[in-house]
Image: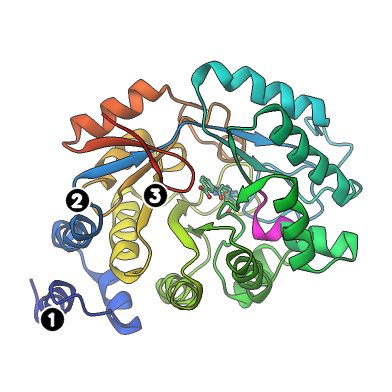
Amino acid sequence: MDKKLTEIKEKVDAGERLSREDGIYLFSVNDLLSLGEMAQSVRNRKTGRDVYFNVNRHINLTNICMSRCKFCAFGRDKDDPGAYCMTVEDAVRLGREALPMNITELHVVSALHPDLPFQYYVDVVKALRQNFPGIHIQGFTAVEIQYFADISGRSVQEVLQELKDAGLGSLPGGGAEILKDHLRNITCPRKASSQQWLDVHRTAHQLGLPTNTTMLYGHIESVEDRVDHMLTLRELQDETGGIQSFIPLPFHPENTKLSHIPRVTAVEDLKVISISRLMLDNVDHIKAFWIMLSIGVAQISLAFGANDLDGTVVEEKITHAAGATTDVGIPKSDLIQLIRSAGYTPVERDTVYNVIKRY
Ligand code: V47
């Protein structure tokens, strides 16, 4: 280890918070195993040898989107081939089909549909709640919530309260990308700004709705942007404590307007996982989303600071539109086997990290 890395390791061992400069330095480190070892020491302190997983089903209500972000291959215009929009009954049917798998979560994420009223989303949540009273509904990224406020003339607080009253239990972490407006102005100028994204999460926390957070990396951002993104989330977490998890999402370029940018390598994925564990000292769970990371990298990430493997999923559309070659879902038994064969204890959790069963 060089002198700077040794200094950072001493800080990590002492439980001291890492600085922006430390984070940027860590991205220049080629000694991946030392990074992993440091991240692992933090993760072991926080959650020991347990690795969480959840049994969930993703539902993407529509892909018709007015935002059309440059990194996204999922969105469509209304008349495009492949454009779709579910009815409330369609969503309920998908939930019902997943019941035999004993799902505990429905993960409902959509697009910014130009015509659907806010009431449609409230109706979806109400119908899911009525039909599946025991299943947690995690739904709508902060970007969608901001959009619902824009189209309905309500405040973000009113939108969140109405969805909560309808049965919403928590917010997923999508739409964060990189929380810097000079980048958003290039990659996704038509959706919530960094400040708006953060304000939605802050408001959700104030209303008792926990949230996940993400970072889309490997597109036009710099290493400094990644570290600043993590620090922004760390600051919000210091303030509210409402962030449950952080999920680094590697950019998949195929069929996007940024298709000239190659997918980052596995080493970069593991660096991002390790560094997020080290920088986000106040976030308990670093989640490996195997759909985007690949099964292999997701499993190895459990030795680089990740302590959560999401999830059974059943049907993934966003990454697969962008060329992902992973399956669209995975049986629970495979998740258990992946965690166990990596040397960890599989722990099935619900959406808000209550333990359902240790395997
Ligand atoms: O918001 C879009 C990203 C997100 C691409 O909260 C892309 O538990 C890679 O947020 N390549 C949706 N990523 C997925 C997401 C998520 C996934 C799993 C768990 C949770 C959680 C959240 O995917 C979008 C966007 O940031 N995305 N296009 C792409 N081409």
* Foreground label between 2 and 1: 2
Percent x, y of residue 261: 51, 54
User: Label 3 is placed on what type of residue?
Assistant: Lys
Asked which secondary structure carries label 3, the reply is: strand
Asked which secondary structure carries label 2, the reply is: loop
Task: Please give the name of the residue rendered at 69% of the width and 60% of the height, measured from the top-left corner.
Answer: 143
Q: Are marks 2 and 1 in contact (CB under 8 Å)?
A: no
* Foreground label between 1 and 3: 3
Which comes sooner in the sequence, label 2 or label 1?
1
Task: Please give the name of the residue rendered at 82% of the width and 34% of the height, measured from the top-left corner.
Answer: 85
Which comes sooner in the sequence, label 2 or label 3?
2
Q: From the Cβ of disc 3, is ligand 1 less than 8 Å away?
A: yes
Quadrant housing residue 293: top left
Asked which secondary structure carries label 1, the reply is: helix
Task: Please give the name of the residue rendered at 66% of the width and 67% of the height, measured from the top-left corner.
Answer: 200
| Residue holding disc 3 | 287
Q: CA distance from mark 2 to mark 1?
A: 24 Å
| Residue holding disc 1 | 7
Quarter of the image with the N terminus is bottom left
